[in-house]
Amino acid sequence: MAYGTDPRDRYSYGEVSDSDRREFLKALGVIAGGSVAGATLNDLRQNVSTETTSGLAEMGTALQDGLTGTLDAALLSEQLAALTESVESLPELEAMGIPDAGAEAYQSLTTPAWEINDHLAEVGFFASAEETLPAFSPDHIETTTRQLLHMEGLPATLSEVGFAEREQTALVVNIVNARDQLSWWMATPDYPPADAVDDGVVYEYVAPLHQRAAEGSLLWIDGLDHYLWQREPLVTGEMIDRGLWDVKSMLGGYYLLGSAARDLAAEDIADDHLTTLTTASTALMIISQEFLITDVIRITDEKRAPRSAVSN
């Protein structure tokens, strides 16, 4: 696959191609050749070395120390189980195609994630992450992705929420290969003050980066019922298929975030893993909503469904 100007050329929809994998490894300083399609996380782990994670551990400690409330492990476990059921229902949405008027098929997917979201906001998780974790610089993406690959429990966690082996690989590869989209998202303090801009935007009210990514992904999913119904004549099966992968990726990202919070509540997560999972899960939710816009929301003449013949 030749990489062109279409951002989807660097995005894996559930399966990693040779060129996607080579792009991923090249970004992490590894030159790979030969036929590598269908690579697993273990294959990537063998190619990519890990580096010191002392900085990640310090960030994780600071994130935990910055919480203003107590995480509820029972609530998080209950909602994570419900989130798994949401992902398991995605094939039903594929079979459904376009939702009926007034349907809430997509919106119902996010109910458990919103419960997790409200709890994390209440205990100060997002505010602490904003204070202690950097935005998505190339160095931070590289460091956390290397660490993510070498987390032994990652495949099992992603399997819990319904990601097959090839899909797990696609999620991790997408974090690095879609790094340009990640760099567009700034931490709230990096926005200019209200009196320094002419567009009237009051930037001090921009939500913390990780909260903005999480809630944004859920809002995009919530809106799909009405959006797809309203644009039924334009929507193709390919749009539905690609959109469902984006939705699954967003829910998978939220599952990783919720799992990290649950394990933190149980005091069963290393500090560097907390940083890594918080960063990676947020990255997945950012990437997926960016591509949902490309795949489904912005319907161009080139990709819309054919116009129906007008009967006389």
Image: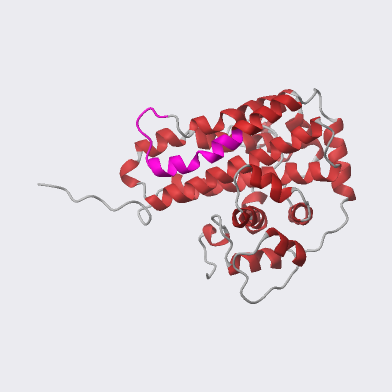
Residue nearest the observer in this picture, 169 or 58: 169
Residue farthest to the left, as pictured: 312
Res. 79 in view:
yes
Q: Main secondary structure of the magenta part?
A: helix
Residue 128 falls left or right of residue 251: right
* 87 vs 107, nearest the viewer: 87
Please, is residue 277 above or below residue 139 in the view?
A: above
- Magenta-colored stretch includes residue 154: no
Q: Which residues are magenta?
A: 83-103
Residue 219 quadrant: top right
Rendering coords of residue 299 (x, y %):
40, 48
Res 191 → quadrant? top right
**Extreme-bottom residue of the structure:** 34
- Residue drawn where x is 66% and y is 25% of the image: 118
Question: For this view, does 97 lie left or right of residue 114?
Answer: left
45 relative to 285 in the view: left or right: right
In this picture the colour scheme is secondary structure
Query: Can residue 201 be seen here?
Result: no
Q: Position of residue 231 (x, y in %)?
A: 35, 40
Say whether residue 98 is magenta: yes
Q: Residue at the location (56% across, 59% down)?
A: 15
Q: Residue at x 59, y 62 (%)?
A: 16
The image shows residue 97 at horizontal and vertical percentages of 38, 42
Picture quadrant where residue 38 is located: bottom right
Horizontal arrangement in the rendering, residue 264 relative to residue 186 (left or right) = right
Depicted 44 relative to depicted 106: above or below: below
Which percent across, then down, holds residue 130? 76, 36
Question: Residue at (72%, 37%) from the top-left corner?
Answer: 259
